Image (tube, grey):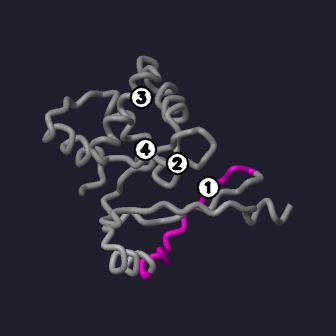
Amino acid sequence: METTIKGYMDQLQKRGYKYTNQREDVLRILLENKESHLSCEEVHGIVARESKDVGIATVYRTLQLFERLGIVYRINFDDGVSRYELNLGNENHHHHHLICTECGNVTEVKLDLLEALEDEIEKEEGFVIRDHNVKFYGICKKCKNK
């Protein structure tokens, strides 16, 4: 998967969806903040600073479409807010999150230490695991050192 605005927009058009400036704006914000986990409101806030004509409903519908098409992943950190992460084309989307209970900072852990467990589950249960999501809650280095 080509992880450029053009690459993502080409995906949309190949699947019969129109290229719109609003969709491009949302993609650009997600690309510029690919290390973040932005909520719909945060994406809208950034887009609205540059394009006053983009409403929050448009951003919400765009993110829903992108999720359906596999362009973004929707992530919930158990705080009632959906956040979005751009699909950067990694074949396996296995990574974990460290969530600070003091400041709310979210850090990704790229290590996947559950591969052996997944293999065992698949072998023993005959269950095909497609993805998993692990969240660790605690206190980040910055808050711990305060």
Please, is residue 99 above or below residue 127 in the view? above
Observer-side mark, 4 or 3, equals 3
Q: Nearer the viewer, mark 1 or mark 4?
A: 1
In primary-sequence order, the first of circles 1 and 4 is 4
- In the image, 97 versus 51, the foreground residue is 97
Q: Are marks 1 and 3 in contact (CB under 8 Å)?
A: no
Mark 3: which secondary structure?
helix
> Which stretch is magenta?
103-116
In magenta segment, residue 91: no
Identify which amino acid the numbered label 4 is placed on: Leu
Q: Which residue is mark 3?
A: 59
Name the residue carrying label 2.
37
Q: Measure how far apart labels 2 and 1 are at the Cα level.
A: 8 Å
Residue for point 58% across, 60% down: 135
Q: Disc 2, disc 1: CB below 8 Å? A: yes
Asked whether disc 1 touches disc 4, contact meaning CB atoms under 8 Å apart, the reply is: no
Q: Disc 1 on helix, strand or loop? A: strand
User: Marks 2 and 4: CB-CB under 8 Å?
Assistant: no
Residue identified by numbered label 4: 30
Q: Give the amino acid type for the residue marked by disc 1 in the picture.
A: Val
In the picture, measured across the screen, residue 117 lies left or right of residue 24, that is right
Instruction: Identify which residue is drawn at 37% across, 47% down.
Output: 72
Give the CA separation, mark 2 to mark 3: 15 Å
Q: Earlier in the sequence, mark 2 or mark 4?
A: 4
Q: What numbered label is drawn on residue 106?
A: 1
Q: Earlier in the sequence, mark 2 or mark 1?
A: 2
Q: Secondary structure at mark 4?
A: helix
Q: Residues within 10 Å of mark 4 (few under 14, many from 20)?
A: many
Residue 11 figure quarter: top left
